[in-house]
Amino acid sequence: MREPHVREIICLEPSALALRLKGQRHVTLLESVMRSEHLGRYSFLACNPAASLEVNARGTFLNGVPTKKSPLTLIDRIVSENRQRHVTGLPPFQGGLAGYISYDYGRRLEPHARIPDFAPICPDLILHHFDCVAAFDHMQERAWIISETPARADEMEELLRHRPKVTGGHAIEGWQSNFTREDYEKAIARTVDYILAGDIFQANITQMFSAPIPAGFDPLGFYRVLRQKNPATFAAYMDYGSIQIASSSPERLLRYDGTTVEARPIKGTRRRDADPVRDANLIADLTSSRKDRAENVMIVDLLRNDLSRVSKPGTVKVPVLCGLETYANVHHLVSVITSELKDRHGIGDLIGATFPGGSITGAPKIRAMEIIAEIEQAPRGVYCGTIGYIGFNGRTDLNIAIRTAQFSNGIARVQGGGGITARSNPAAEYEESLTKIKRIMEAFRP
């Protein structure tokens, strides 16, 4: 088992340090902007990976070489071959795989699902092996470079001394949805019909807004505006050449600390109000809503079932059911499900059992995914997939990539939506889809 090299550095704002890495390969920032002891304590910054795993329309590639092996099997193999001692007292990601798995990768996990192959927005999966990472503990206000060799730490430290690059523009205008309001409300009504017919209990339906990327637009500059407009616990910025991603997600797909698995689905949303009395009334409306609670509980049951496939018998628990969490723009109902992974299963098995997250598909999952594809008629790309890390020290943390903007092929894309149940009102669901992306769209304004 490898021993990591650790070097303490001055603790600066991670997104400001990311400016110094502009021009490096595959810059990856996993940032907790809404900071707290439990959820928002750590951030991570890396670039220039030692190796890469990519899944795209042409196949699966390990370091650019095609392979027939399952990507999830490859993840477990890569982790097993690069085991590293966990250093206590440091942030949990101390080197390993980091990147994204797109929502559209989910169809590969369900080969019998009737989901068409839409023209892709981006590769289905990109995970980079980072042998050097800058790790930040915001509670202690300390930072370290953690690397496989002292030489790699030297390289990173030198890069972080560079003068920050100047950011370009962050504004984009001319957004168009793939639905008119009338068509979106009809799509919601159609989903309700599927529910009443007994096909599903719930489905997550979204609309996509897109616009041409103007000359001079800088995705990292946009991310730095977004993180201020919508601070989030599971934010991220990635520049992977053909695609850039800026995420301000509040939701965790799963965390694994070597013993315990934790999932944190979000279901149930109300907008914030600047008036404290009206804001309190919105909270009361959310916490007393039978519709939102039922929606949340259905997803909890789905995730309990998903986790039970790879967890030790009797270990799946729900320590928090429909707890209230408040963010810059919205209030959410959040539940917590925990379990213990069976000894014979690796992180690839855990991802295979839980991906895509139930909160952004619906239940039952496979039929909900089929209906989503039929109604949305478009790929989601990274949106509703997952962004995060899989550490060689046995620690993993993956978000659900909501509140996320994607930049590829000259087009910017943002999606928003919500969980549809038998009680859903199409007009209200349309308004909720706009509420979900309000702060993202504000970040695009000049």
Image (spheres, rainbow, N blue to C red):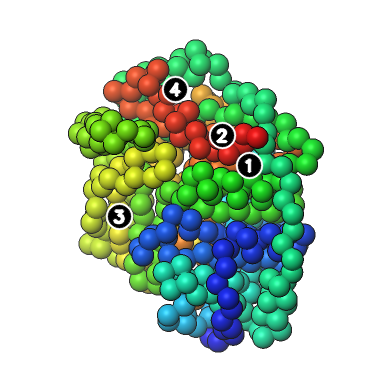
Among the two numbered marks 1 and 3 on one chain, the one whose residue lies closer to the N terminus: 3
Which kind of residue does numbered mark 1 sit on? Gln
CB under 8 Å between discs 2 and 3: no
Amino acid, disc 2: Met
Label 3 sits on residue: 337
Residue sitting at 56 percent across and 34 percent down? 441
Instruction: Classify mark 3: residues with Cα within 10 Å, few (<14), some (14-19) or many (20+).
Output: many
Real-space Cα separation, disc 2 to disc 1, in angstroms: 13 Å
**Quarter in which the C terminus is drawn:** top right
Mark 2 burial class by Cα count in 10 Å: few <14, some 14-19, many 20+: some
The residue to which callout 2 is attached is 441
Inspect the image, locate mark 4, and give the three-letter code of the amino acid beneath it.
Tyr
Q: CA distance from mark 4 to mark 1?
A: 21 Å
Q: Is residue 60 visible?
A: no
Three-letter residue code for mark 3:
Ile
Relative to 75, 153 lies left or right: right
For the residues marked 2 and 3, what is the alpha-carbon distance in whole angstroms?
32 Å
Q: Secondary structure at mark 4?
A: helix
Eye-nearest disc, 2 or 4: 2
Q: Residue 241, position in %: x, y?
A: 74, 52
